[in-house]
Image (cartoon, helix red, strand yellow):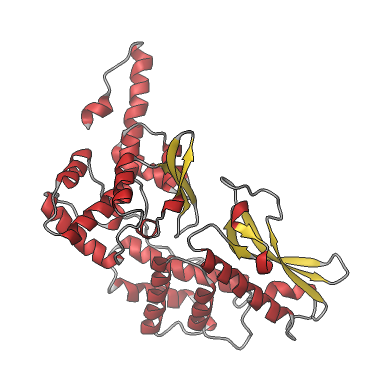
Amino acid sequence: MDNAIIRYVFDKKKQADNTLKKGLLQIEVRIQGTNKCTYISTGIHLFKNQFSFTNGFTCKGVTNALGITAKARRIYNQVEAFVLSEDCKKIEDVKNWKKPKANAGSFINFIRQELSKKDISYDTAKNDRVLIRQLEAFGKINTFQDLTYENISEFDVFLRKTIKASSTLNKRHSNLKHYIRQAINMELITKDPYVHFKMPSKKSKDPIYLTESEIKKITEYVPVNEKLEKIKDIFLFQIFTGMAYVDMQSFTEEDISEMEGYKVIRSNRKKTDEYFVSLFLPEAESIAEKYDYDLPKISNQKYNDYLKLLAAGAGINKNLTTHTARHTYATYLLNKGIPIETVSRAMGHSNIKQTQHYAKLLGKKIIDDMKKLLKETSGSPQPDAYSQST
């Protein structure tokens, strides 16, 4: 289709601003001299001041600006190559720019192709690569024709030989189901083999979090060497910011701004791209200043290994991981009476159900509701049952 004009279009809905709302970056393909056009989403959402028309599109003002720009240009080039190919004869064909050719019958290769197109976190990509290895080891799901209820059931039996946690098993099936749905949407298969398959429960163990007295133990603990001191510092930084490991490791002074006279952290979670904002608590600020806003860098695996030494040294009988700090931050805020909706925004949760899990863990909503009931029936304030229980 040689009469097409291709360009970037940002915030077509005119809803982006510089602080709270982001706009979508799209690629417009238009037939020259007509109103016939279609839009391809890049999956990139930006604030207004992060977008520039330089060289068609350039991202600015964020830590991974170069990566975002590169992703947008990669998608642009792929769309352009398809539009100029023999496979694209009319504007309606543009929507098929990602669709593999009919002879690409390998389902495992399809997963690899889709995975290469995604801009996802390291952990998510790692889980999908594990799925690929397990499908290869299973050996019965190779082509699209192999996606049957019988094979999915046998794959479940195969997985259960090595996976004991129901939540992990559910995650593996969910990943596989995601790619099957992708194949259905792209009309590579017509039936979903999961329609009659009963998914394993995704219920997992309650998250581990620290109490205020345990946080104090870590704060007062004097590490035996400089390495463990750095681990203690970044773990406490996580506790008082609620940042996930990957967000903490990419934290810079650019993430700090002022709002109503207070320093706040504003950023987007690397894993979900969900926006979050919270006060920059003094405990976290002092750690950031100690390292001149360049926190120590360490791999996730090594970090978790050192956290075991930190727990032992501080006298805490819990299995500390990078997730423990984030769980602690959520329960800490809820314990201080911060509304659950506010905690959800501070955590960068995609929905409030994730945050409600912490409230259930604390029994806070039960106690709060019962306190209201007691006040209504007695007509006078009652002792704070929750504060007494903690």
* Quarter of the figure that contains the C terminus: top left
Residue 320 seen in the current view = no
> Which image quadrant is residue 225 in?
bottom left
- Residue drawn at 33 percent across, 50 percent down: 288
> Which image quadrant is residue 46 in?
bottom right
Say which of 213 and 293 sits in front: 293
Q: Measured from the top left, where is residue 384 in percent x and y?
A: 27, 23
269 relative to 102 in the view: left or right: left
Q: Residue furthest front?
A: 292
Q: Residue furthest bottom?
A: 103
330 relative to 38 in the view: left or right: left
- Residue drawn at 68 percent across, 81 percent down: 81
The number of discs equals 0
Residue 309 seen in the current view = yes
Residue 382 vs 280, above or below: the answer is above
- Residue drawn at 70 percent across, 50 percent down: 14
284 relative to 229 in the view: left or right: right
Say which of 115 and 57 sits in front: 57
Say which of 49 and 96 sits in front: 49
Q: Measured from the top left, where is residue 233 in percent x and y?
A: 25, 52
Q: Measured from the top left, where is residue 360 in percent x and y?
A: 34, 40
Residue 251 vs 35, above or below: the answer is above
* Quarter of the figure that contains the N terminus: bottom right
- Residue drawn at 38 percent across, 80 percent down: 133
Q: Measured from the top left, where is residue 350 in percent x and y?
A: 48, 50
Say which of 380 and 141 sits in front: 380
Q: Residue furthest right?
A: 33
